[in-house]
Image: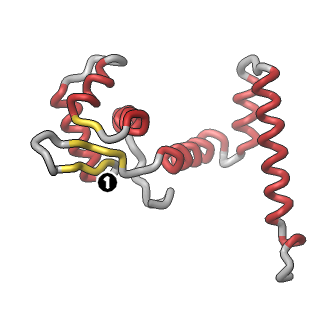
């Protein structure tokens, strides 16, 4: 499923997806038990959320056995990318620079984190250089 086709999950649906991404295919009972460790939620609420997510094609259900097993129908990375794109557009006018400046300016960043950020920036720069039209032999 492409980013544009993924329905935007609600906060509660995202919590369920986190459980499914972390633990793989799971029963309603297991998902509910995991969610209950973080907040007060009833079994029927979890079941209803999963049923709604099934309709939205955020999850798939295996009906082979008496107990229904649900699994994520969307990849974690794609969903994170979709949510991040929407957030950056809404909160920072689409500017990744503003997002990074805000994130780095609001808390102390360790040397290790800064080194990782530098490596990431170097990798992006190399990737951009190899994908630039000047390096395209077809031109």
Q: Which residue is found at the position 10% from the left and 42% from the top?
A: 66
Q: How is the image coloured?
A: secondary structure
Q: Residue furthest front?
A: 65
Q: Quadrant of residue 96?
A: top right
Task: Give 74 or 6, whichever is nearer the viewer.
Answer: 74
Q: Nearer the viewer, residue 118 or 100?
A: 118
**Residue 62 image point, x, y percent:** 21, 50
Give neighbour class at mark 1: few <14, some 14-19, many 20+ (Cα, 10 Å). some
Residue with the most extreme right position:
134
Count up the numbered dots.
Answer: 1
Q: Residue furthest left?
A: 66
Furthest residue toward bottom: 138
> In the picture provided, is 116 more to the left or to the right than 11?
right
**Image quadrant of residue 38?**
top left
Choose top left, top right, bottom left or bottom right for residue 108. top right
Q: Position of residue 97 (x, y in %)?
A: 76, 41
Is 5 displayed left or right of 130 in the figure?
left
| Drawn side of residue 86 relative to residue 18, left or right | right
Quarter placement of the C terminus = bottom right
Query: At 71% from the left edge and 46% from the top edge, which residue is drawn?
Result: 95
Q: Which residue is mark 1?
A: 57
Give x and y (percent) for residue 112: 78, 24
Q: Tell me residue 59's x, y (percent).
A: 31, 48
Quick check: 63 left or right of 87? left
Which one is nearer the viewer's eye here, 114 or 87? 114
Give me the residue at 31% from left, 41% from top.
25
Q: Residue at x 76, y 21 (%)?
A: 109
Q: Quadrant of the N terminus?
A: bottom left
Q: Is residue 44 above or below residue 107?
A: below
What secondary structure is marked by label 1?
loop
């Amino acid at each position: 499923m492409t980013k544009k086709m993924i329905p935007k999950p609600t906060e509660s649906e995202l919590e369920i997806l986190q459980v499914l991404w972390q633990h793989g295919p799971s029963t309603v009972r297991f998902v509910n038990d995991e969610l209950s460790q973080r907040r007060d939620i009833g079994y029927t609420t979890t079941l209803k959320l999963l049923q709604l997510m099934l309709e939205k094609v955020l999850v798939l259900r295996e009906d082979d056995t008496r107990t229904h097993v649900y699994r994520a129908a969307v990849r974690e990375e794609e969903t994170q990318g979709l949510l991040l794109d929407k957030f950056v557009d809404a909160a920072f006018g689409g500017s990744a620079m503003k997002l990074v400046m805000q994130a780095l300016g609001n808390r102390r960043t360790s040397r290790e984190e800064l080194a990782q950020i530098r490596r990431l920036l170097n990798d992006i720069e190399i990737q951009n250089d190899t994908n630039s039209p000047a390096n395209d032999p077809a031109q």
